[in-house]
């Protein structure tokens, strides 16, 4: 478990201080020139002050060279990549070098820091909405997306229903906030993915007792979930008499979450070689959305 940001006064390693992130407090970030924030994806001062106490810190006694780049600037750079859909090597020159930003992104992905940060934000957003931090119900669904040429054959497949060659994002959702992600090849069915996801979901969120799903989750999965996981799965189907667009109870929540993800151009297609990188991109996208919502209620 990583440590939270230190909030008590500390001595800085540089004389000129423009930020209170850990890289400024304990590293050499203040030796770098200040960056003028000019993009819509940059964190505002209000957003930074809101999320700074929730940031996990890389303080595990590994030693080595102190961090040389501001954490806030690193977050701005990652949000720019996710929102704009650019390549890492196309990072604008006013950000740190692309390989340093990617190293920061990779470190947070592999150590689980981005998931930890995301989960802390989700709890705060739920509390701000007058809900308990831990959910008691969830909605599950999947979204098929085309895969770029860099995605290998081992992690891609053909979804015959959507006629898409790529990957599937299997999400478990509550009020539009993400609970769990599972990236699979496009030919993995909803029921197959659910048998992998639901035990982990139940272990991670023992308070969840009810789950809503669509017709792709029918069959023995419902009985198995009830007897093994003590989880009640309710399938919400579209009426045969319905014509055109119809808002389905509960299911619209997760569909809206999929729409939110597609606002991030990096997620319009799967450009990641590894499935865990795809999951990390989704977490960063939802993290930006929740940051806006916390700092400015009604926005995001």
Image (cartoon, rainbow, N blue to C red):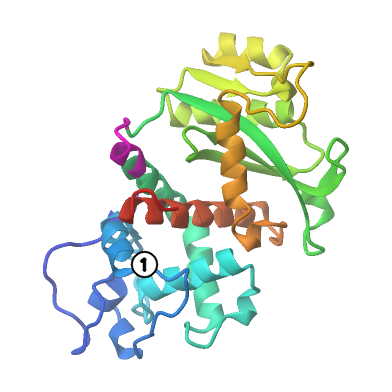
| Image: 29 above or below 166 | below
Location of residue 239 in the rendering, given as x and y in whole percent from the top left corner: 73, 16
Residue 248 as seen in the image, left or right of residue 95: right
Circle 1: is it few (<14), some (14-19), or many (20+) Cα within 10 Å? few
**Residue located at (53% from left, 31% from top):** 200
**Residue located at (39% from left, 43% from top):** 122
Residue 188 as seen in the image, left or right of residue 85: right
Q: Single out the residue that lies furthest toward the front.
A: 243
Q: Is residue 281 magenta?
A: no
Q: Is residue 130 magenta?
A: yes
| Residue 103 seen by the camera | no
**Residue located at (77% from left, 31% from top):** 189
| Residue 65 seen by the camera | yes
- Front residue (pair 40, 57): 40
Location of residue 236 in the rendering, given as x and y in whole percent from the top left corner: 65, 18
Residue that mark 1 sits on: 62
Q: Single out the residue that lies furthest toward the left.
A: 9
Q: Secondary structure at mark 1?
A: loop
**Residue located at (69% from left, 32% from top):** 193
**Which residues, given as a range, are shown in magenta?**
125-132
Instruction: Say which quarter of the image contains residue 49.
Output: bottom left
Total marks in image: 1
- Front residue (pair 299, 275): 299
Location of residue 103 in the rendering, given as x and y in whole percent from the top left corner: 52, 72
Location of residue 216 in the rendering, given as x and y in whole percent from the top left corner: 74, 24
- Front residue (pair 130, 101): 130
């Amino acid at each position: 478990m990583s440590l939270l940001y230190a909030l008590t006064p500390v001595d800085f390693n540089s004389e000129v201080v423009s930020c209170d992130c850990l890289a400024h407090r304990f590293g050499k970030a203040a030796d770098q020139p200040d960056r003028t924030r000019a993009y819509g994806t940059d964190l505002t001062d209000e957003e930074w002050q809101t999320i700074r106490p929730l940031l996990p810190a890389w303080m595990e006694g590994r030693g080595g060279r102190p961090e040389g780049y501001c954490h806030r600037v690193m977050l701005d750079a990652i949000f720019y990549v996710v929102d704009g859909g650019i390549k890492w090597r196309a990072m604008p020159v006013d950000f740190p070098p692309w390989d340093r930003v990617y190293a920061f992104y990779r470190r947070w992905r592999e150590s689980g820091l981005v998931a930890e940060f995301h989960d802390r934000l989700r709890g705060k957003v739920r509390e701000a909405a007058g809900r308990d931090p831990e959910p008691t119900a969830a909605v599950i669904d999947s979204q098929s997306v085309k895969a770029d040429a860099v995605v290998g054959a081992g992690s891609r497949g053909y979804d015959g229903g959507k006629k898409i060659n790529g990957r599937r994002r299997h999400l478990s959702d509550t009020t539009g906030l993400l609970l769990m992600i599972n990236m699979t090849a496009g030919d993995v069915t909803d029921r197959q993915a659910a048998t992998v996801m639901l035990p982990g979901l139940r272990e991670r969120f023992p308070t969840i007792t009810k789950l809503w799903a669509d017709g792709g989750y029918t069959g023995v999965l419902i009985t198995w979930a009830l007897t093994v996981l003590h989880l009640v799965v309710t399938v919400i189907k579209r009426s045969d008499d319905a014509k055109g667009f119809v808002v389905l109870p509960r299911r619209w929540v997760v569909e809206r979450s999929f729409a939110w993800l597609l606002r991030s151009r990096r997620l319009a297609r799967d450009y990641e070689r590894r499935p865990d990188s795809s999951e990390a991109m989704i977490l960063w996208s939802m993290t930006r959305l929740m940051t806006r919502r916390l700092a400015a209620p009604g926005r995001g």
